[in-house]
Structures are given as C-alpha cells and as structure tokens.
Image (tube, grey):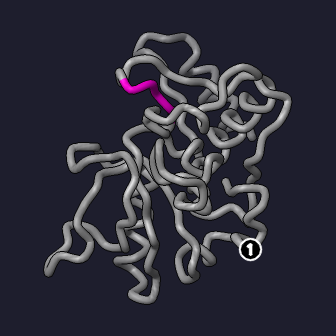
Amino acid sequence: TSQASAAAVGDFDSLAFGPYTVTVKGPAWESRSREPVFSGDYLGGSADTTITQSVQFKMLQMVMLSNPRANFKIFTAPTLDTYRPDGQTRIDSTLFTDPCSIDDAQLGVFDMVACDKDQAGSPKGTGPHATIMDLPLAIYNLNGRYERTRRCDLVTVGRDFATGGYGLGFPYTSDFSFLFSRAILGL
C-alpha cells in the first residue's frame, strides 16, 4: 500500500533496496546502537519497545537476514488502526473525521502513510512512503476508507510477494471439516 502521489514506490524491491521508507506494526528500537536488537534503520513512529512484532515486521527482518544488501528504512506503529489519545477509541476516516487533522491521535500504519506523518503532531512530509500488508487486509482497509469517505489516497502497487495459502479451522467435532476436506481434495 502506498500513497497515490508516491508513484516511484513501485514494488517491494524499491523498499528493500531503495531510498523509500516503510511502516509496519512493530516495536521501536535503537538502530544506531553498537549491537541493534533488529536489522534496518529505525526512523521513528508511535510504537515503543514493548509492541509485539507483526508478521510484516518479522518478514522484513527475515529479508534483511537472508540478503545483506537489503536494508529497510522502518517506521513502526503499535497498531494498524488510529486511536484517540486515550488509546481506547478508534478513529475511522469518515466524511466528518479526518485522522490526519487530529494532532494528538495515535496514528496506525495506514494513516501514517495516508497522512504522510510519522506521528500525530508532526509536520506533513515526515511520514513513511508505504506500508507492507497482506493483500486481503489491505483491500479490506482501502475499500472501507473509500466507502466511508468516497475517496482514498492510498493504492496498492507492485507484484505480490511472499504469497501463501490460507487454512480453514473447524471445531474437532464439526461436520464441515470432512465436507471441506473432501471438496478440497476434489479440486
């Protein structure tokens, strides 16, 4: 997911090997210490050191461990969603509410990109160029933004990467587990 105006962020490689920045849900760390806890250049955001690593954060770390040339410039946030300062009330983009205009909001990863800010109260132009997200979640979020506001300044770009399957979980005694297993085997 990228800002519509940041056309130069064309794919995953432009984030891994280029000058562009990315935001994901994950912890903060001191990347300039002698022995940093994580790989990559930590640029800031609203997360702290106690935030758990998201799948996307772990994936960035794995890419950098497996390819020494890769170096992501990373912003982190504690959540995908934006919250009011109380940390309890979620802010959705609507026709009447623009998370970018709330100075003390805790920006989530999508709004960090959409607002082009590393955190609320920061000037525009300090935020990440893109976020890396599972495609179904990105599409769900972008469609929801469009439905609520009739506009969305975020777009998906580039080819799919790290694609994988989905699993279905059923209770042990469910009649559906056998039916779905048979249907999948019949594909």
- Queried whether the magenta region covers residue 25, the answer comes back as no
Residue name at image x 47 percent, y 44 percent: 121
Residue name at image x 48 percent, y 39 percent: 107
Residue 63 rendering spot, x and y as whole percentages: 44, 73
* Residue 42 falls left or right of residue 115: left
Per the image, label 1 sits on a secondary structure element best described as loop
Identify the magenta region. Answer: 81-85
> Which quarter of the figure is the C terminus placed in?
top right
Q: Is residue 164 visible?
A: no
* Residue 164 falls left or right of residue 43: right
At label 1, the amino acid type is: Ala
Q: Quadrant of residue 69?
A: bottom left
Residue 129 rendering spot, x and y as whole percentages: 61, 62
Residue name at image x 54 percent, y 83 percent: 17
- Queried whether the magenta region covers residue 82, the answer comes back as yes
Residue name at image x 22 percent, y 50 percent: 49
The residue identified by callout 1 is: 8
Q: Of residues 127 and 51, which is closer to you in this image?
A: 127
Q: Residues within 10 Å of mark 1 (few under 14, many from 20)?
A: few
Q: Is residue 10 above or below residue 155?
A: below
* Dominant secondary-structure state across the stretch colored magenta: loop
